[in-house]
């Protein structure tokens, strides 16, 4: 996409949203036109921590009072229990909560903590050639990780909506006292280099069955209570993140899995891994070799969508077990 | 797993249709619980209570309403020595595989005790315990207990037992046993890894909080 000045860009976006509302097009169809949301940029790696200590984020006993406190609490609830939050749940088109991929309620180091993210936006990135804002980043996670296109609202929360204000209040609070504009140790996920001999989906299947299925179920659908509360998040299928989410990239998911899963065994804040690099890649590839909701940037067919948006380590439009992935789930 | 009062009309009808088989299993389970057998298995009620509520002072766990597959696996493990406990070893070994299954189902079908076991821990200790149970101690990488044991700690299927409404003494004993390597029968070391990250003070607080909660049927 061409470089567009931010203002024009914002204007185009607002016009597009207005048109969508007028024509009753589901906002998800707009992901394609909404330039700010299409080019998801991979995060660069954070520097190593000096010693074992990370940024000292505030505790629950430091929650502020008053109107700002209300906003922080609401934003925290929207992050941790997205599926229950009255406003946030209207923008969730699958069975995920934000905290499912940002452990410790968005506070755990090496699990892409919000205190690490807050101070680095807005940020210009050559890769998508515009200034990326926090607002956009959150709406991006709604569009892809939460599959907002299939939600009641039909798309991510609007820029400047109360929900985005609340969520940003929470993130701002979580980063109180953190330096601005610095790539802090513990930010993002750690990267795990691709093993020399690549990866094996069938080895990944054995690892999955032995170490992951006990929580995420053999068919990847996770576990829910009878009244629909999430117990363990789904990893593939219609309730999972979609084909445009960062987690569908094998390298990104391997970095998350290695230091965060199996839950309780790995320990992100101590950089303690339960799996080897090879195992993390194998199981990440197996997890990402299943169907999930379609990429909202759909170009009309798999080949064109793959060519335009999937030039990275993923299995979109690849044949696995006799099936060409990228069909979507609906 | 399923408890009678939670079943809809269709499964309830099925239950009636299956009644003879279930009743037979229950008869055996009930007999074992109340009388034991001639093979070294003492009557369970002596320790675990007529209502399956256990005994906090003695460290005997409540079993009423817990998952049948979980209880059966524990009995199998205690019989084989996979879970090493001097009191339960002769009892579990004295039961046949069929008897272990029957008595596990008998306890699983029992109503959960109406009252929480209770605790005399101070309010500040309970608050700390609640925070550990519901939010974890992420600064050092401890997930919340409910992340695995399900909402409220009421249990998830056969693998994650209910810990709400459990006696504080028993919870403490188990967490300490995992820390010391005396209990090792958890799937993939999941519980051992978590227990080893806790201090004695944290164990006491979280155990007290779960004991202050009434047992509830699993929500899954």
Image (cartoon, helix red, strand yellow):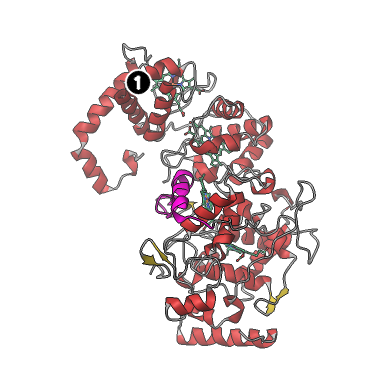
Residue B126, percent across and down?
A: 63, 36
The quarter of the picture where the N terminus of chain A appears is bottom right
- Crowd tier of the residue under label 1, counting other residues whose Cα lies within 10 Å: few below 14, some 14–19, many 20 or above: many
* Residue A69 visible in the displayed image: no
Residue B81, percent across and down?
A: 45, 22
Residue A163 vertical position relative to residue A76 in the rendered view, above or below:
below
* Residue A106 visible in the displayed image: yes
Residue A13 vertical position relative to residue B34 in the rendered view, above or below:
below
Residue at (46%, 87%) from the top-left corner?
A23
Image quadrant in which you'd find residue A80? bottom right
Residue at (59%, 41%) from the top-left corner?
B133
Residue A107 vertical position relative to residue A34 in the rendered view, above or below:
above
Residue A246 vs residue B98, the one in the foreground: A246
Report if residue A194 lies within the magenta region: no
Residue A195 vs residue B30, the one in the foreground: A195
Left or right: residue A277 versus residue B94 is right
Report if residue A216 lies within the magenta region: yes
Residue stretch rendered in magenta on the structure: A198-227
The quarter of the picture where the C terminus of chain A appears is bottom left
Please give the count of numbered marks on the rendered protein. 1
Helix, strand or loop under label 1: helix
Q: Which chain letter goes with mark 1?
A: B
């Amino acid at each position: 996409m061409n470089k567009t000045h931010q203002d024009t860009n914002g204007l185009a976006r607002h016009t597009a949203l207005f048109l969508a509302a007028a024509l009753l097009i589901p906002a998800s169809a707009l992901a394609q036109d909404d330039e700010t949301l299409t080019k998801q940029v991979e995060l660069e790696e954070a520097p190593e921590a000096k010693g074992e200590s990370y940024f000292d984020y505030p505790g629950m006993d430091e929650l502020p009072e008053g109107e700002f406190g209300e906003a922080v609490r609401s934003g925290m609830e929207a992050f941790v229990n997205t599926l229950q939050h009255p406003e946030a749940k209207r923008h969730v088109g699958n069975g995920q909560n934000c905290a499912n991929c940002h452990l410790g309620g968005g506070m755990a180091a090496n699990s892409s903590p919000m205190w690490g993210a807050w101070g680095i936006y807005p940020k210009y990135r050559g890769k998508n050639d515009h200034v990326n804002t926090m607002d956009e980043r959150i709406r991006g996670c709604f569009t892809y990780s939460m599959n907002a296109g299939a939600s009641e609202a039909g798309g991510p929360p609007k820029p400047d909506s109360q929900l985005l204000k609340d969520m940003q209040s929470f993130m701002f609070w979580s980063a109180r006292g953190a330096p601005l504009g610095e790539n802090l140790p513990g930010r993002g996920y750690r990267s795990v280099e691709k093993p020399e001999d690549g990866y094996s989906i069938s080895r990944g299947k054995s690892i999955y069955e032995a170490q992951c299925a006990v929580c995420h179920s053999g068919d990847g659908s996770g576990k829910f209570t009878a009244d629909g509360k999430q117990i363990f998040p789904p990893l593939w299928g219609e309730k999972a993140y979609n084909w445009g989410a960062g987690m569908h990239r094998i390298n990104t998911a391997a970095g998350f899995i290695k230091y965060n899963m199996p839950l309780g065994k790995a320990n992100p804040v101590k950089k303690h891994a339960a799996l080897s690099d090879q195992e993390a890649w194998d199981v990440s590839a197996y997890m990402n070799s299943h169907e999930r909701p379609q990429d909202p940037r759909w170009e009309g067919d798999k080949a064109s969508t793959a060519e335009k948006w999937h030039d990275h380590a993923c299995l979109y439009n690849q044949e696995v077990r006799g099936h060409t992935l990228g069909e979507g789930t609906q | 797993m399923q408890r009678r009062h939670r079943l809809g009309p269709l499964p309830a009808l099925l239950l009636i249709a299956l009644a003879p088989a279930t009743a037979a299993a229950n008869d055996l389970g009930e007999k074992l619980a109340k009388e034991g057998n001639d093979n070294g298995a003492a009557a369970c009620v002596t320790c675990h209570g007529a209502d399956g509520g256990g005994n906090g002072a003695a460290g005997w766990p409540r079993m009423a309403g817990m998952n049948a597959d979980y209880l059966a696996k524990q009995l199998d493990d205690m019989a084989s020595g996979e879970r090493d406990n001097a009191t339960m070893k002769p009892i579990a070994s004295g039961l046949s595989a069929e008897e272990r299954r029957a008595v596990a189902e008998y306890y699983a079908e029992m109503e959960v005790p109406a009252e929480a076991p209770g605790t005399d821990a101070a309010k500040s200790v309970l608050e700390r315990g609640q925070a550990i149970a519901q939010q974890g101690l992420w600064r050092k990488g401890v997930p919340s207990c409910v992340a695995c044991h399900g909402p409220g700690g009421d249990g998830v299927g056969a693998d994650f037992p209910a810990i709400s409404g459990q006696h504080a003494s028993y919870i403490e004993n188990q967490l300490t046993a995992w820390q010391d390597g005396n209990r090792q029968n958890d799937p993939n070391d999941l519980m051992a890894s978590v227990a080893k990250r806790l201090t004695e003070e944290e164990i006491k607080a979280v155990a007290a909080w779960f004991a202050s909660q009434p047992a509830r049927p699993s929500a899954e």
